[in-house]
Image: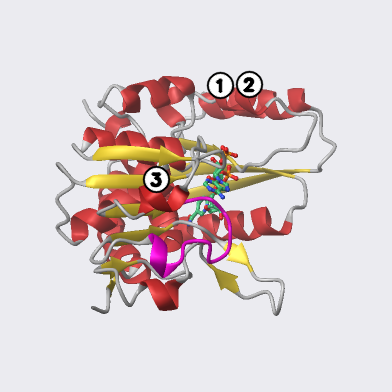
Amino acid sequence: MTAAILDGKALAEELRATFKARVAALTAQGQRPGLAVILVGEDTASEVYVRNKVNACEAAGIFSQKITYPADVAPGTVLLKIAELNFDPAIHGILVQLPLPRQFDEKAVLAAIAPEKDVDGFHAENVGALAQGAPRFIPCTPYGVMKMLAAHNINLAGKEAVVIGRSNIVGKPMTLLLINAGATVTVCNSKTRDLALHTRRADILVAALGKPRFITADMVKPGAVVIDVGINRLPEGGKLCGDVDFENVKAIASLITPVPGGVGPMTVAMLLANTIESAERKNQP
Ligand code: NAP
């Protein structure tokens, strides 16, 4: 069997085409969606991510505001800015690019964002709502994965799903979404004994561990759906690769996401979706 490719780039483009009409309708009603992105420091990867997000907003007609601070900024300055943005009627989404420099308490920063503008879905109130099965904002990366699965009519109820990684950004919200969809979910981490024992049982395997080509063909059940969240830069030549050994795993999986061009573009698309949803909620009578 050779797996079909879950093309995140194409699906993201399809979605973004539908966003334009929603943004135009909101703008016509005086509620143009607006996203504020805060970037602290000069981390190259973060700068690229922020640039992609701002460009994607512009292409969709969403107002975007990029706010940058030097790495040694006082946390109070950033918190004050967040407080201001919380009350800014032109802003429907606030995103603080992570990771933050050492002097910051990341939890305190995320808690400062108004939950109704928390388009990353990292505020404890929004995490709680997701855990209860009534999400307000779904974190962008797992939201994108769910959209990809839905686009391929993958019914999750009763399926064995295995998530590798338990981060707040990917692994945990991914797990909650799969649970809410009726899958039987196993979550693995770096302490898991015999990882392959778990991964080989997976009908749906989500790799989010951040280790290049770690998931090899012998760890995958024939016919499995394999979602590769990982983005790793190979030391030789700086080429991007995922957490899955794509070439070999694609020979036995039924569906697989490539890296690049899989989950990555969907993450940006879902950030736009969350910002538009936020503006639509505010626009309700
Ligand atoms: P993270 O915070 O470093 O979390 C990695 C998780 O993987 C941890 O829970 C860790 O376990 C677990 N892990 C590490 N080695 C393992 C092993 N050998 N076996 C089993 N579990 C292992 O990373 P993250 O933020 O979740 O990101 C994961 C990957 O996704 C990274 O490559 C990142 O760049 C990528 N990413 C991609 C997107 C996208 O849009 N495509 C978005 C976000 C992240 P412990 O908890 O025990 O340490």
In this view of the protein, can residue 40 be seen by the observer? yes
Residue type at the position of mark 3? Val
| Figure disc tally | 3
Quadrant holding the N terminus: bottom left
Question: Compared with residue 177, is residue 131 higher up or lower down, i.e. above or below?
Answer: above
Q: Nearer the viewer, residue 37 or 124?
A: 124
- Is 54 within the magenta? no
Question: Compared with residue 89, is residue 2 higher up or lower down, i.e. above or below?
Answer: below
State the image coordinates of residue 135 (x, y, percent, origin top left): 30, 29
Residue at 77% across, 46% down: 41
Magenta stretch in the rendered image? 208-219
State the image coordinates of residue 260 (x, y, percent, origin top left): 48, 70
Please give the residue where the numbered disc 2 appears in the rendered image: 108
> Could you tell which of marks 3 and 2 lies nearer the N-terminus?
2
Q: Classify mark 2 as within 8 Å of ligand 1 or not, answering yes or no.
A: no
Please give the residue where the numbered disc 3 appears in the rendered image: 163
Which mark, residue 111? 1
Residue type at the position of mark 2? Ala
Which mark, residue 29? none
Badge 2: few (under 14), some or many (20 or more) residues near its Cα, within 10 Å? few
Going by the image, does 50 lie left or right of 33?
Answer: right
Badge 3: few (under 14), some or many (20 or more) residues near its Cα, within 10 Å? many
